[in-house]
Amino acid sequence: MNASTIVDLSYIVAAILFIFGIKMLGKADTAKRGNLLSAVGMLLAVIVTLLSKGLSYPLVIVGLSLGGAV
């Protein structure tokens, strides 16, 4: 399995976690787990994105700075 396949599979897993997490937010008794599931999906997506080839770290820092200023 090459790196591109692992990245693609990671994004698919992150999307599935988001979908199930959002679905679980609909009921009070599962909302806490749904929030956790969505957070894990977001963390996975961010980690995979930051470890991807071709990412411009100065551009990421600029984006984080602008987002933090708002």
Image (tube, helix red, strand yellow):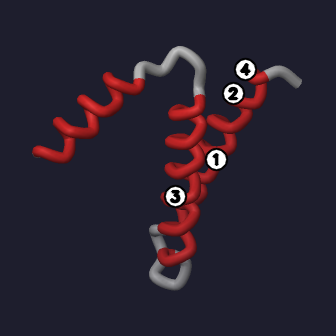
- Distance of mark 1 from mark 4, alpha carbons? 19 Å
| Residue under numbered circle 3 | 38
* Amino acid type, residue under disc 2 in the picture: Asp
Check whether the beta carbons of the residues at disc 1 and disc 4 lie within 8 A of each other. Answer: no
- Distance of mark 3 from mark 1, alpha carbons? 9 Å
Q: Residue at coordinates 76% horizontally, 23% vertically from top-left?
A: 3
Judged left or right of residue 48, residue 46 is left
The quadrant the N terminus occupies is top right
Judged left or right of residue 52, residue 42 is left
Q: Residue at coordinates 46% horizontally, 82% vertically from top-left?
A: 28
Mark toward the start of the polypeptide (1 vs 2): 2
Across and down, in percent, residue 22 comes to: 49, 58
Secondary structure under the numbered disc 2 in the rendered image? helix
Residue ranking furthest to the top: 54
* Amino acid type, residue under disc 3 in the picture: Ser
Check whether the beta carbons of the residues at disc 3 and disc 2 lie within 8 A of each other. Answer: no
Across and down, in percent, residue 33 comes to: 56, 74
Residue ranking furthest to the front: 58
